[in-house]
Amino acid sequence: MPEPTAQTILATSLVPELVSDLMGPRAGLVAIKINAVLQDVIGSSDAAFAQQAIRSNPILAAQLTQRLQAIRGATPPSAANSGPPAIVHPRSVPGEIFPTNRLIDVAPLIMSVLIISGCIGFFGWILLVSQGERDHTTSNLLHLILGSLVAILTTTVNYWFASRSSPSAAERLSASQQTQQAEVVKGLTQSVRDNAQQNIELVRSIAASVAKPIAAYPAPAIAGTAKPIDVSAAAAQSKAADFNTSMAVVLREEGGFVDNPEDPGGATNMGITLRTLTAWRHRPTSIEDVRSLTVAEAERIYRAHYWNAMDCDALPAGVDLMVFDFGVSAGPEEAIRALQRAVGTTENGMMGPITLAAVARRNPADLTDRLAEERRQFYRGLSTFGTFGEGWSRRVEEVKAASLRMIS
């Protein structure tokens, strides 16, 4: 069974019934469909961005859940059984799955009827031809035939009772395979629960807030921390200043329009690639569209697709810049994975309460150093490091210095 990805973990936290599909022969096709649904509903197949989008928009979350259910024609979660599949006796399932009218099923009955009929006929013939006096040999033959007939009847009755009340060897093997399958499903379900606790809480919050406007949502709390996030006016102003500072650093590092044929990202302007701009505008775009991109639109893209997608408002000052700039350079999922490696939490590419709680326990300056090293190692592993490595390394040092200034 393939390892669960960030996209499949997000999908199964919303539609648990997909777990059985993801561990079966259709796993690859289902995973492709999940990515396509995320791209169509959210506008991006990036799991971190999708998580942030549905967290802030319950209506979008409901639409995503409905589309994911349509992948397998699932019933609504309230009516579905999300536990491991029950092990059933093959004779208790519909005939379309385990046919009961096959010749192999009725052949023993036909043979039994023929044998019993033959014995009864032969017994009657002996009685008919031996009317009157019977010698010793004839009597013994009658007793033998009668005993055989009783034995055949007993064997036939026992066979049919046994065959209709207990599974055959093949059926017992099927039950054993179903037991193993149930254990696999149980293990994957536990993995989903362990690696996507934030998504489970998201589903609960959506169910509890159907009749409540988004503006009425209370301030979120980070699980495992001593106090909830401070969303006071002063704190909001401070995080807005952090975003502006981080945005200035990113724009300085990215520069203006570049179309380097050796850059796998293709044409970029202020760090925004043609692919990112197309996803943002939800329509085909050209290199000229990238060239004419405004600073205001670039900032909106960075806010939605990177800063909010990685929940940078919940990170300490300085650390938010390190994560944000790495996400711009390598993608939000890779940046979150680097942060999770740095703080020692499960590496799933999704920013959740467990990761945030671990970040809160770390010294921001030490964590900044660790993130810088994670970033260096990532760049060294790229095939284009020989071409762009010097610029990437310089950027790491400049962003690290800016982050430490924000911390101090």
Image (cartoon, rainbow, N blue to C red):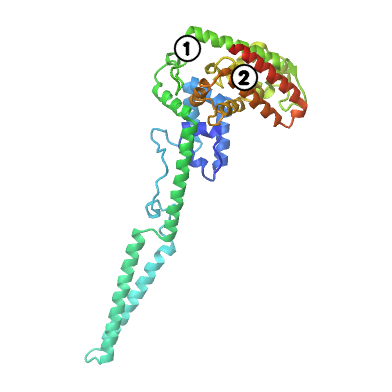
Per the rendering, the mark at residue 231 is 1
x and y percentages locating residue 313 in the rendered image: 54, 16
Number of residues whose C-alpha sits closer than 10 Å to that of mark 2, classed few (under 14), some (14–19) or many (20 or more): many
Q: Callout 1, which amino acid? A: Val
292 in relation to 392, above or below: above
Residue found 28% across the figure and 89% down from its top: 138
Q: Is residue 162 left or right of residue 1?
A: left
- Quadrant position of residue 335: top right
Residue found 45% across the figure and 18% down from its top: 220
Assign the C terminus to one quadrant of the image.
Answer: top right
* Tag 1 secondary structure: loop
Farthest left residue?
A: 132
x and y percentages locating residue 98 in the rendered image: 43, 54
Mark 2 and 1 residues: CB-CB less than 8 Å, in contact?
A: no
Number of residues whose C-alpha sits closer than 10 Å to that of mark 1, classed few (under 14), some (14–19) or many (20 or more): some
Q: Callout 2, which amino acid? A: Met
* Tag 2 secondary structure: helix
Q: Residue tagged by mark 2?
A: 322
Q: Could you tell which of marks 2 and 1 lies nearer the N-terminus? A: 1
Query: Disc 2 vs disc 1: which is toward the camera?
Result: 2
x and y percentages locating residue 363 in the rendered image: 55, 19
Q: Is residue 323 left or right of residue 117?
A: right
Asked if one can make out residue 69 in the rendered structure from this viewpoint, the answer is no
Q: CA distance from mark 2 to mark 1?
A: 22 Å
Q: Is residue 372 left or right of residue 84?
A: right
Q: Is residue 287 left or right of residue 303?
A: right
Asked if one can make out residue 265 in the rendered structure from this viewpoint, the answer is yes
Assign the N terminus to one quadrant of the image.
Answer: top right
x and y percentages locating residue 77 in the rendered image: 42, 33
Pick the front one: 60 or 215: 215
